[in-house]
Image: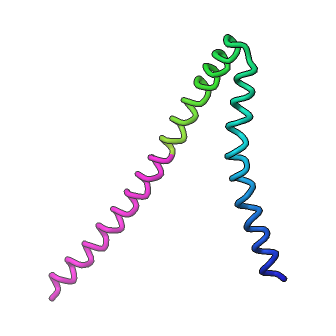
Amino acid sequence: MRKALQLLAGLLLLAVPIGVMLFAPRSVGRWFSDLEQDTAVATIGAAAIISVPVVTYWTSRVLEGRRAVEAATRSKRVELYEEFFAFLGAC
């Protein structure tokens, strides 16, 4: 019974995003086609003005996080190499 419930919950969690991905573009397209041309152009412009800085900000945050991970890995690697060469020098 529990496995069937888990399977049903998993299928539901997959079905909802797929349904949204299929339904959202169609409804947005219908909404834009119902707008006047000037209003549609202004809406697209406003969306671009808002979305470009947001995408740029999140991209820079992701890149900073990657750089931080690389720097931490590099410092650990240097310590490991120092221990290895100290061991080789002791032999």
Identify which residue is drawn at 69% across, 45% down: 22
Percent coordinates x, y for residue 2 in the rendering: 82, 81
- Left or right, 10 with reference to 63: right
The quadrant holding residue 86 is bottom left
Identify which residue is drawn at 38% across, 57% down: 70
13 over 66 or under it: above or below = below
Percent coordinates x, y for residue 59 in the rendering: 49, 41
62 over 1 or under it: above or below = above
Observer-nearest of 50 and 19:
19
The kind of secondary structure the magenta stretch mainly shows is: helix
Identify which residue is drawn at 73% across, 58% down: 15
Percent coordinates x, y for residue 57 in the rendering: 53, 37
Observer-nearest of 74 and 12:
12
16 over 10 or under it: above or below = above
- Left or right, 9 with reference to 66: right
- The image's colour scheme reads rainbow
Observer-nearest of 43 and 57:
43
In the rendered image, residue 67 lying in the magenta stretch gets the answer yes
For the N terminus, give its image quadrant. bottom right
The quadrant holding residue 47 is top right
Percent coordinates x, y for residue 91 in the rendering: 15, 89
82 over 72 or under it: above or below = below
The quadrant holding residue 32 is top right
- Left or right, 40 with reference to 6: left
In the rendered image, residue 12 lying in the magenta stretch gets the answer no
Residue, far right: 1
Identify which residue is drawn at 27% across, 77% down: 83
Residue, far bottom: 91
Magenta stretch bounds: 62-91
